[in-house]
């Protein structure tokens, strides 16, 4: 499965438009898996601090020796 990431907006009639370059790459009648990520408008600053702290702790425990798992399929 290939993944393409691109910014877009909902049209007035509530449709998501694909960039022209993708419409040329994706065959007609192709089944697509769509994941919609929406930027949160009101992020609680304290919640954001906890999220960043958790991410830093997680990444701090990652050792170079662990990269062997990145190559596994």
Image: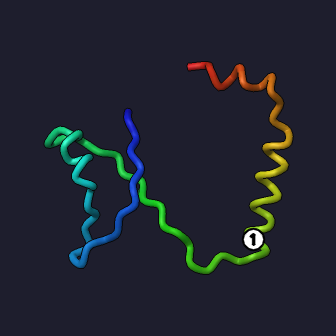
Give the side of residue 38 with respect to residue 14, left or right.
Answer: right
Residue 72 place in picture, x, y as percent: 61, 19
Give the side of residue 24 with respect to residue 3, left or right.
Answer: left
Label 1: state its secondary structure: helix
Residue 5 place in picture, x, y as percent: 41, 50
Colouring scheme applied when the structure was drawn: rainbow
Q: Is residue 7 above or below residue 33?
A: below
Which residue is at a point 83% across and 30% down the rendered structure image?
63
Which residue is at a point 77% across and 25% down the rendered structure image?
66
User: Which residue is the extreme one toward the front?
Assistant: 21
Give the side of residue 1 with respect to residue 41, left or right.
Answer: left
| Total labels drawn | 1
Q: In this view, does 28 lie above or below 47?
A: above
Dividing the picture into quadrants, the one containing residue 59 is top right
Which residue is at a point 61% across and 80% down the rendered structure image?
42
Q: Which quarter of the rendered picture does the C terminus lie within? A: top right
Query: Label 1 neighbourhood size at 10 Å, few (<14), some (14-19), many (20+)?
Result: few
Give the side of residue 60 with respect to residue 19, left or right.
Answer: right
Q: In this view, does 17 lie above or below 67?
A: below
Which residue is disc 1 drawn over? 47
Which residue is at a point 80% across and 27% down the rendered structure image?
64
User: Which residue is the extreme one toward the left?
Assistant: 28
Q: Which quarter of the rendered picture does the N terminus lie within? A: top left
């Amino acid at each position: 499965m290939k993944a393409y990431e691109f910014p877009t907006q909902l049209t007035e009639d509530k449709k998501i438009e694909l960039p022209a370059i993708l419409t040329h790459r994706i065959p007609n009648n192709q089944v697509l898996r769509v994941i919609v990520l929406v930027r949160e408008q009101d992020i609680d600053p304290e919640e954001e601090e906890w999220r960043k702290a958790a991410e830093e702790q997680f990444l701090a425990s990652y050792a170079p020796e662990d990269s062997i798992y990145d190559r596994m399929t």
